[in-house]
Amino acid sequence: MASPIPLPFSKPLDGISGNTLAIHHDKLYAGYVAKKDEIATKLDALMRGDLSSANATYSELRGLKDSETFATNGVYLHETYFDVLGGDGVPTGQLADALATTYGSVDAFIAVMSACAMASRGWTVLAWDTHDATFRIVNGDAHNHGGVWGCLPLIVLDVYEHAYFIDHGSDRKAYVAAFWKNLDWSKVDTRYQKAVGRES
């Protein structure tokens, strides 16, 4: 059975409180980890048994397979979200250079991704598209919605209300600004270099 990954930073964040993190990480994310394991156990048992009831309208297999992607992506997206926090928000590295080349400047990229975050109901993700060898910003209204196969997440921004309502009420724009202040660009740069195959 998997265990929740501890928060990868220890310093207080600017505009994202410890109370929010305790609820978001210790309860919500930990719950997805537990459900991912529970679903995997049930799927394993089902796969070893009678599969004759499998049906696209309704069946236990259909329900578990749908829940599998929801819970698994709930784990992976949250882990990447937490992993890229804890920095000083100062853009550095090859990723910052590549974003400046693609979008005109890092500030222009942040403006575009922030606008996407305002238009999303759940997640906004900067990913590296391994097919087109380019950046792609995708929105997801649920954990298993909006992703593009072959795209590797670099920056994951959770815009569900649980990520900001305690600290900012309904002011999502203030929360998104706080997210950028806390981004750890060195970690994101490492993700980028791995994604494009340039890790030294």
Image: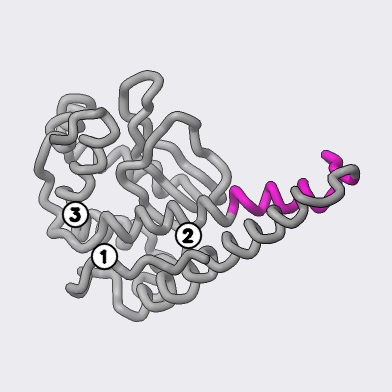
* Quarter of the image where one finds residue 172: bottom left
Q: Is residue 55 magenta?
A: yes
Residue hosting label 1: 8
Magenta segment range? 53-70
Instruction: Tell which circle, 3 or 2, labels the residue nearer the N-terminal end.
Output: 2
Residue hosting label 3: 184
What label does residue 138 carry, if any? none
* Quarter of the image where one finds residue 57: top right
Q: Position of residue 28 (x, y in %)?
A: 49, 70
Instruction: Residue type at mark 2: give it.
Output: Tyr
> Which residue is at a point 38% across and 78% down the rendered structure image?
22
Residue hosting label 2: 160
Instruction: Residue type at mark 1: give it.
Output: Pro
Q: Which SS type dominates the magenta stretch?
A: helix
In this view, which residue lies farthest toward the right? Answer: 52
Whether residue 127 is situated above or below residue 51 in the rendered picture: above
Quarter in which the C terminus is drawn: top left
In this view, which residue lies farthest toward the top? Answer: 132
152 relative to 86 in the view: left or right: right
Q: Is there any visible trace of residue 165 in the rendered image? A: no
Q: CA distance from mark 2 to mark 1?
A: 21 Å
Q: Secondary structure at mark 1?
A: loop
Instruction: Tell which circle, 3 or 1, labels the residue nearer the N-terminal end.
Output: 1
Query: How many dots with numbers?
Result: 3
Instruction: Tell which circle, 2 or 1, labels the residue nearer the N-terminal end.
Output: 1
Q: Which dot, 2 or 1, sits closer to the camera? A: 1
Q: Secondary structure at mark 3?
A: loop
Q: Position of residue 120 (x, y in %)?
A: 47, 47
> Which residue is at a point 30% across and 76% down the rendered structure image?
17
Whether residue 109 is situated above or below residue 181 in the rendered picture: above
Q: Is residue 3 magenta?
A: no
113 relative to 74 in the view: left or right: left
